Image (cartoon, grey):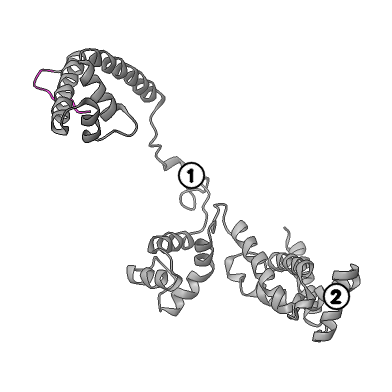
């Protein structure tokens, strides 16, 4: 945006705020009449007067969230959306002032906008995270913690106790708020030609390693199948139920099925495992004294 366009936008924002702050306040009776006219008759003129009178509330709430780095005009715009949602749902027969009711909707709309736009990484997806996001800075000030750098363990513990949440959640949000988003295409240094993505290591397996691992897995499965053929039927059953099943059964339950003690089941299992290790080790070319772990 050019300097001239930016100046025009700022001037428009100032005129809007000035006009909103000079809108006449509503008495409880006038507010009630406007709300009834809108709810019962769909009177858009009544809605416009109600919204205009309480736009100052939106501006006041939006001003509390300016330190999140978003334009005040955008915050006000979202707050007005919340104000209109409040007008749509407000029940004047409950004898509650519209400003009291609308305050919650305005804050919710502005907070949701901040959470969606503060970072490209989704933040505040749970109630605990949202509470932390909007209260951590204030709580750090209250307990005397400096705003720069990570919080010490004692500070995290005090914040967690105050909000009734886990200390690990406080630590993660503290780290999240301490650094802004950075592009991987950002140059390293002022005159650097390399970008940050150039120095990131890829810990994933290479295509060659993936192919070798898949081939080795197939080979090991074939060796295991052949080794199992060398066991007795009872040994194969115990190995299948104890080692190859997703949830292995207990020695005691197998003993009841086979009619033997659980100690005897353990002995048979150990003997079968020794046979499997020896056979697979032989196929893998290991020396007799080399132990195969699996």
- Residue 22 sits in quarter: bottom right
Q: Is residue 67 visible?
A: yes
**Nearer the camera: disc 1 or disc 2:** 2
Q: Which residues are magenta?
A: 287-294
User: Where does residue 285 sit, x and y in percent of width and height?
Assistant: 18, 14
Placement of 89 over or under 206, stated as above or below: below
Q: Residue at x 22, y 31 (%)?
A: 256
> For the residue labelled by badge 2, is the local secondary structure a helix, a strand or a loop?
helix
- Residue 254 sits in quarter: top left
- Disc 2: CA contacts within 10 A as few (<14), some (14-19) or many (>=20): some
Tell me the distance, in whole angstroms, between the alpha carbons under discs 1 and 2: 61 Å
Which residue ends up furthest to the left in the rendered image?
A: 289
User: Where does residue 198 sit, x and y in percent of width and height?
Assistant: 45, 40
User: Where does residue 169 sit, x and y in percent of width and height?
Assistant: 43, 61
Taking depth in this image into account, of 227 and 129 the one nearest to the observer is 227
Position of residue 33 in the picture relative to residue 193 (left or right): right
Q: Quadrant of the N terminus?
A: bottom right
Magenta stretch: includes residue 206 = no
Magenta stretch: includes residue 289 = yes
Sooner in the amino-acid sequence: mark 1 or mark 2: 2
Position of residue 195 in the picture relative to residue 85 (left or right): left
- Residue 30 sits in quarter: bottom right
Q: Is residue 7 visible?
A: no
- Badge number at residue 36: 2
Placement of 19 over or under 257, stated as above or below: below
Q: Residue at x 26, y 15 (%)?
A: 223
Taken as a whole, is the magenta stretch helix, strand or loop? loop
Taking depth in this image into account, of 133 and 35 the one nearest to the observer is 35
Residue corresponding to mark 1: 195
User: Where does residue 288 sit, x and y in percent of width and height?
Assistant: 10, 18
> For the residue labelled by badge 1, is the local secondary structure a helix, a strand or a loop?
loop
């Amino acid at each position: 945006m050019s300097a001239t366009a930016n100046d025009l936008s700022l001037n428009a924002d100032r005129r809007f705020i000035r006009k909103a702050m000079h809108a006449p306040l509503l008495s409880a009776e006038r507010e009630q009449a406007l709300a009834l006219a809108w709810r019962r008759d769909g009177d858009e003129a009544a809605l416009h007067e109600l919204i205009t009178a309480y736009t100052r509330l939106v501006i006041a709430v939006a001003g509390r969230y300016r330190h999140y780095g978003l334009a005040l005009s955008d915050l006000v715009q979202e707050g007005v959306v919340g104000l209109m949602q409040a007008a749509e749902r407000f029940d004047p027969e409950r004898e509650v002032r519209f400003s009291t009711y609308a305050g919650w909707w305005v804050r919710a709309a502005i907070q949701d906008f901040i959470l969606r736009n503060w970072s490209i990484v989704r933040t505040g997806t749970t109630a605990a995270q949202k509470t932390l996001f909007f209260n951590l800075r204030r709580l750090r000030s209250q307990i005397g913690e400096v705003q720069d750098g990570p919080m010490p363990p004692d500070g995290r513990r005090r914040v967690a106790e105050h909000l009734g949440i886990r200390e690990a959640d406080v630590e993660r949000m503290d780290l999240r708020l301490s650094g802004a988003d950075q592009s991987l295409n950002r140059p390293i240094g002022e005159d650097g030609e390399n970008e940050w993505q150039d120095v990131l290591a890829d810990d994933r397996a290479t295509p060659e390693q993936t192919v070798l691992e898949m081939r080795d897995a197939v080979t090991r499965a074939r060796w295991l199948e052949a080794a199992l053929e060398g066991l007795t039927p009872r040994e194969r059953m115990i190995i299948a139920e104890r080692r190859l099943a997703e949830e292995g059964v207990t020695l005691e339950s197998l003993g009841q099925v086979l009619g033997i003690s659980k100690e005897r089941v353990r002995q048979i299992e150990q003997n079968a495992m020794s046979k499997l290790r020896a056979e697979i080790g032989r196929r893998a070319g290991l020396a007799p004294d080399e132990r195969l772990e699996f």
